[in-house]
């Protein structure tokens, strides 16, 4: 998983009734776009997370993908 500052991280709900949500990546802590990431939720809450298999990076427009 590779991301840059400003990308979104789609977190899929893992239990019935829990909806998907998108958080903004505000800092990439790992090397070359690798996790962990500091993310900001819609309510302003920030946390550091290492995304699991239930997450997908949504690259901002015009951002090249690192392979």
Image: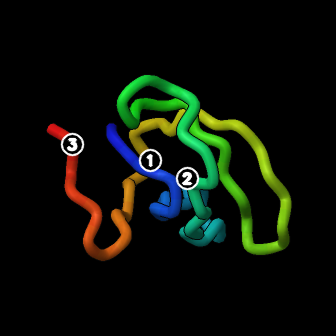
Residues at marks 2 and 3, CA–CA distance in whole angstroms:
28 Å
Q: Which of marks 2 and 1 is in front?
A: 1
The kind of secondary structure element at disc 2 is loop
Residue at the location (54% across, 39% down)? 28
* Residue 41 in the image, given as x and y percentages of width and height: 73, 64
Density class for disc 2 (Cα within 10 Å; few <14, some 14-19, many ≥20) is few
Quadrant occupied by the C terminus = top left
Along the polypeptide, which appears first: circle 2 or circle 1?
A: 2
Calculate the distance from the C-alpha at mark 2 to the C-alpha at mark 1: 8 Å
User: On the image, numbered disc 3 is attached to which residue?
Assistant: 66
Instruction: Specify the color scheme.
Output: rainbow
Left or right, 51 with respect to 1, comes to: right
Q: Check disc 1 and report the residue beneath it.
A: 54
Q: Please, is residue 60 above or below residue 36 in the view?
A: below
| Residue 2 relative to residue 46: left or right | left
Read off the residue under disc 2.
14
Residue at the spot 34% in from the left edge and 63% down from the top edge:
59
Is label 2 in contact with label 1 (beta carbons under 8 Å)? yes
Residue in the picture at 66% in, 51% down: 39
Quarter containing the N terminus = top left
Dot 2 or dot 3, earlier in sequence: 2
């Amino acid at each position: 998983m590779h991301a840059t500052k400003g990308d979104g991280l789609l977190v899929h709900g893992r239990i019935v009734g829990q909806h998907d949500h998108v958080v903004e990546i505000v800092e990439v802590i790992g090397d070359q776009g690798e996790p962990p990431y500091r993310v900001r939720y819609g309510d302003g809450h920030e946390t550091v997370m290492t995304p699991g298999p239930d997450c997908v990076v949504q690259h901002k427009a015009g951002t090249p993908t690192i392979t």
